[in-house]
Image (tube, rainbow, N blue to C red):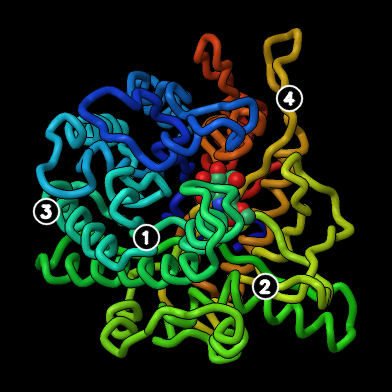
Amino acid sequence: MAEGGFPPGFLWGAATAAYQIEGAVDEGGRGESIWDRFSHTPGKTRDGDTGDVACDHYHRYRDDVRIMRELGLAAYRFSVAWPRIFPEGRGRPNPDGVAFYERLLDELEKAGIQPVVTLYHWDLPQALQDRGGWPHRDTAYRFADYAAWMFERLGDRVPYWITHNEPFVVSILGHVTGEHAPGLNDPAAGFRTAHHLLLSHGLAVQAFREGGRRKGRIGITLNLSPVHPASGSPEDEAAARRVDGLINRWFLDPLFRGAYPEDMVEHFGRLIPLPEASEDDMRLISQDVDFLGVNYYSRQVVRHDPGELFLQMRQIDGPGPKTEMGWEVYPAGLGEILRRLHEAYTKAPLFVTENGAAYPDTVSPDGAVHDPDRIAYLRDHLLELSRVIAGGVPVQGYFLWSLMDNFEWAHGYSKRFGILYVDYPTQRRIWKDSAYWYRRVIEANAVVE
Ligand SMILES: CO[C@H](O)c1c[n+]2c([nH]1)[C@H](O)[C@@H](O)[C@H](O)[C@H]2CO
């Protein structure tokens, strides 16, 4: 392939998530999620922003799919809101809930766009949280029931299923730092959550396989980052290994090696009561997947800090330019992580299921949204991706985060990741320059200027 080129059939997509774009939180029989509860809790989100309306995608999905078709997307990654399917998280399914997703699938099918469905992108039914949430082992089995019901109902229409989006973020930000729903500060609960998320993934894979030879493929999406020491000192290198041990290896090792990383079990075991990892659990967790999704945004740079309780480390800024999230622009990290996965963890196909950047986009007097920094970010990461694929790593698709500006969790609507600008008061979608650019990339199946 020429520099910047991609193989024939490479899957060009964009990604979103239910709570971040749908709105209509009280429509169609939807039950409350932990993000409804969290975002309506004073002080939890910037300016008290909530996903009550978001991008009103629940009502505007036809127009949004039309834009996807005009962009030339081959695939669209979205998540199903569990509380729309099972308002109480369990029991009787809600026909109006699944009907919304069937209408969305109809539009995608008419547009020739392949659906990539994430079953869990953080919006746990509040009713399950009230019964203990992810720290409670039973929730893993409720997820498996939900997943099995979805496979039965939509299995013939969905070519790619992703069980979970970023179990690290759900576990640590939701249950240890408290920045995300349900807002707990309980490390033991965080590690039980991580185990039960992985267990629920395994139970869902088992249900998918037992449901007969389905047309689709199933995988999981992890947020993965290279972790670099701030200096070559042994202390900083050890700190980097510890952070790598939590962000990357705490999830990769169970999924692909059938066991938690020993160095980290020893490290955390001294601080926190860790959940039991039975042989049966680890066998379920490490079943083969058809693909691995990778969400990549930046690298981590860390130094040793004996005063920090959890990992004795301090994250520091890398020297590169920063996005509006304060994340260093570091395209080489995408190649580093993808090559490491292929060499050390799995020969399964890989998908970049999220990559993108937030910048302070504004609408210019000419009505356009000029976002050269985002185009530069995307171009540099796609050039790196092209090199990785040319080097033999089987990356089969790329999903830009995000199709449109949306509810950025605790940051509310203050951060814009979309290639479509959303004017929230009017809900107008305005193509940013990056949208026109991405359409040209897709048309060329190669990075363009
Ligand atoms: C370190 O970034 C994480 O991997 C990450 C970044 N992001 C994510 N995970 C989530 O999957 C999305 O819902 C966010 O909207 C998106 C942008 O913040």
Q: CA distance from mark 1 to mark 4?
A: 42 Å
Numbered tag placed on residue 134 in the rendering: 1
Q: Residues within 10 Å of mark 1 (few under 14, many from 20)?
A: many
Q: Residues within 10 Å of mark 2 (few under 14, many from 20)?
A: some
- Quick one: label 1 or label 4, which is nearer the N terminus? 1
Query: Callout 2, which amino acid?
Result: Phe
Q: Which residue is mark 4?
A: 370
Q: Nearer the viewer, residue 409 or 116?
A: 409
Query: Callout 3, which amino acid?
Result: Glu
Closest to the camera, between mark 1 and mark 4, is 1
Question: Residue at horizontal 20%, vertical 53%?
Answer: 146
Quadrant including the N terminus: bottom right
- Residue 275 at what x, y percent from top left? 41, 79
Q: Nearer the viewer, residue 235 or 127?
A: 127
- Residue 30 at what x, y percent from top left? 26, 31
Question: Residue at horizontal 17%, vertical 47%?
Answer: 154
Q: Looking at the picture, does residue 174 appear above or below residue 110?
A: below
- Quick one: label 2 or label 3, which is nearer the N terminus? 3
- Quick one: label 4 or label 2, which is nearer the N terminus? 2
Q: Which residue is mark 3?
A: 152
Q: Which residue is mark 2?
A: 310
